Image (cartoon, helix red, strand yellow):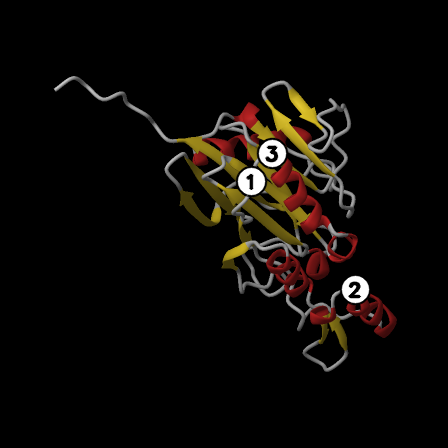
Amino acid sequence: MLYSRFVLPSSQARAHVAVTDRWGGFSSTPFSSLNLALHVGDDETVVAANRGIVANTLGLNPEALRFVDQVHGSRVIAWDENGAYDPLTGDRTDSVTADAHVTKTPGLGLVVMVADCVPVMFADPEAGVVGTAHAGRAGMVDGVVSATVAAMRELGASQIQVAIGPSICPRCYEVPADMRDQVGSVEPVTASVSREGTPAIDVAAGVAEQAAREGCEIVDFSSTCTRESSDLFSYRKDAVTGRFGALVWLEEMATHPLKDA
């Protein structure tokens, strides 16, 4: 059910971070069993049930989970109790086509779905702002990490902590040489080699480099490779497969007025 879960506390709020695995749901092969994605060909009723399991396991209202329509880009949207809006302008939007989202509203679970791409979870619990991003090769090159940080700062974040979830490792992410050169020209740390010594890309390294350059503190960096793990979905390994989720949400700290002595 859960690959990982931890809390980033502050005096104002707790930022919860969680990553699901592929087990404990209702989906059948090839999506078995905790597939959270609607766009891969799985039964929508089953996916809804899987999402409900995740919400209930984490103590969230299933209706409070927020998803975006991911397109390997860098657009960021924000959420509040009234719906989605542009975090830079404040304008309301009906479009949830984006690869990152942010909020300062407690109780909203911001989910991104992955199966080799890098899930990135952001939090400034002191300021009460969180976000998540889906950073594939194209999104990383396009600047989704920096865009998410900028959106969070518009909402008041200043000391942003980052958790980088499991993704395909460079030993398993073989690409054409010209693609490695193109990505490496943007982020040199991404240029790598596969287990066979062929050109490869380290997307997670690029994400970490960008987060550090933005002044974020990396508090967790998964070493698990999705292609090598039997507990996680991998598009490179299976092609037709499900998606696991990475999510973050805020919980306000309970406050109690002082009683008279």
Q: Quadrant of residue 184?
A: bottom right
**Helix, strand or loop at disc 1?**
loop
Dots 2, 3 in contact, CB < 8 A: no
Q: Amino acid at mark 2?
A: Val
* Residue 50 visible in the current orientation: yes
Residue 155 shows which numbered tag?
3
As measured in the structure, the alpha-carbon distance from the residue carrying label 2 to the one carrying label 3 is: 28 Å
**Tally of marks:** 3
N-terminal label among 1 and 2: 1
Q: Is residue 141 left or right of residue 103?
A: right
Residue 186 shows which numbered tag?
2
| Residue 160 percent across, percent down from the top left | 54, 47
Front one among 129 and 237: 129
Say which residue appears at 74% left-offset and 55% top-offset: 239
* Residue 28 visible in the current orientation: no
Q: How dense is the environment of label 1, judged by Cα within 10 Å: few (below 14), some, or many (20 and up)?
A: many
Q: Amino acid at mark 1?
A: Ala
As measured in the structure, the alpha-carbon distance from the residue carrying label 1 to the one carrying label 2 is: 26 Å
Q: Which residue extends farthest left?
A: 261
Dots 1, 2 in contact, CB < 8 A: no
Front one among 28 and 216: 216
Q: How dense is the environment of label 2, judged by Cα within 10 Å: few (below 14), some, or many (20 and up)?
A: some
- Please, is residue 143 above or below residue 192 in the view? above
Residue underneath mark 1: 157
Say which residue appears at 53% left-offset and 30% top-offset: 52
Say which residue appears at 59% left-offset and 64% top-offset: 225
Q: Is residue 114 left or right of residue 230?
A: right
